[in-house]
Amino acid sequence: MNVTLRQLRVFRAVVLEGNFSRAGDSIGLTQPAVSRSILELEAQLGVKLLDRTTRDVILTEAGQALALRLERLLDELDQTLQDVGGLARARRGKVRVASSPTLSANLMPSCIAACAEREPGIQLVLLDRIQQDVLSSVRSGEVDFGVVIEPVGTDDLNVEVIMKDPFVLITRPGHPLAQGHAVRWRSLTGYPLVLLDHASGSRRLIDRALEHHGAHCEVAQELGHPTTVFRMVEAGIGISVMPALAVPAGGIPGLVACPLTPVVQRDIVLAHRRNRTPSPLAQRVWAVIRDVARGKLTPP
């Protein structure tokens, strides 16, 4: 049975108006279109619903049975559709977002502030986790979406690049490489490195860049947090390669950040589960984070 909502609404109009022409006027259809819709409905149901006289229409027994139930059903359907449509217009609620540590510290605060200003009815709840835990939270549905660094194996995710973040050299001001200009990757050869560990989404990208550009270095320390890396460099344990986003806007006290050449950048992406459309509230928060990110560094 392939009864359409349009056919049912036309039938209701005919019942209310008692006339095909008046029914058509009330719902914006011609009289022939109303007649055709009623005939199609009767064909689908396999029963006659209306008897027509020269001026009016009379409900058959089957037509009366349908008319008695139809009004309530259509009212309930209209209310349901209004309720569902209201979700798209909702302005209040909670959105859960997970992000990796450097992004939580250096991107998300401005995103949360922007969200509070642009969407005051939405509470953005941030989960600060290492990259793999962020991805697990996204896949499990614990969070609405994640902010991560160039994830691999994302066939089950939808991702959008929102920022390209270059890597920079971090060292003490008196270091031979701290000359105030771009430093070539291969110039790092022979210097001990203090790097983020492999739980960071950036580490594999740094290792790949070092190898690709011929920089042969010993890794002196592998650490989980950028602040610890900076303190190690400040103590003279080694130099570091870090994403520019990890460097505070006012710089790092006691250290300098120098651009590396050729420029190597990491992609910062938003990710949600494939085939699971984020809620309207989550989509608005997604847009806020994207807009803030694209205003910070090089757009993708």
Image (tube, grey):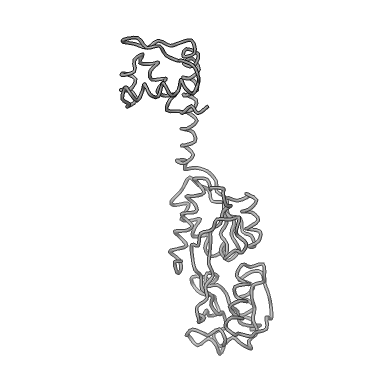
Q: Nearer the viewer, residue 6 or 206?
A: 6
Horizontal side of residue 198 vs 244, given as left or right: right
Tell me: residue 222, above or below residue 62: below
- Horizontal and vertical percent for residue 223? 67, 72
Q: Residue furthest bottom?
A: 176
Quadrant hosting residue 50: top left
Tell me: residue 261, above or below residue 120: below
- Horizontal and vertical percent for residue 290? 47, 58
- Residue in the image at 45% along x and 40% along y: 89
Q: Nearer the viewer, residue 159 or 10?
A: 10
Q: Nearer the viewer, residue 80 or 17?
A: 17
Horizontal side of residue 198 vs 99, given as left or right: right
Total marks placed: 0
Tell me: residue 27, above or below residue 265: above
- Residue in the image at 65% along x and 84% along y: 217
- Horizontal and vertical percent for residue 128? 61, 59
Q: Nearer the viewer, residue 203 or 32?
A: 32
- Horizontal and vertical percent for residue 166? 51, 73
Tell me: residue 9, above or below residue 105: above
- Residue in the image at 50% along x and 30% along y: 80
Quadrant hosting residue 240: bottom right
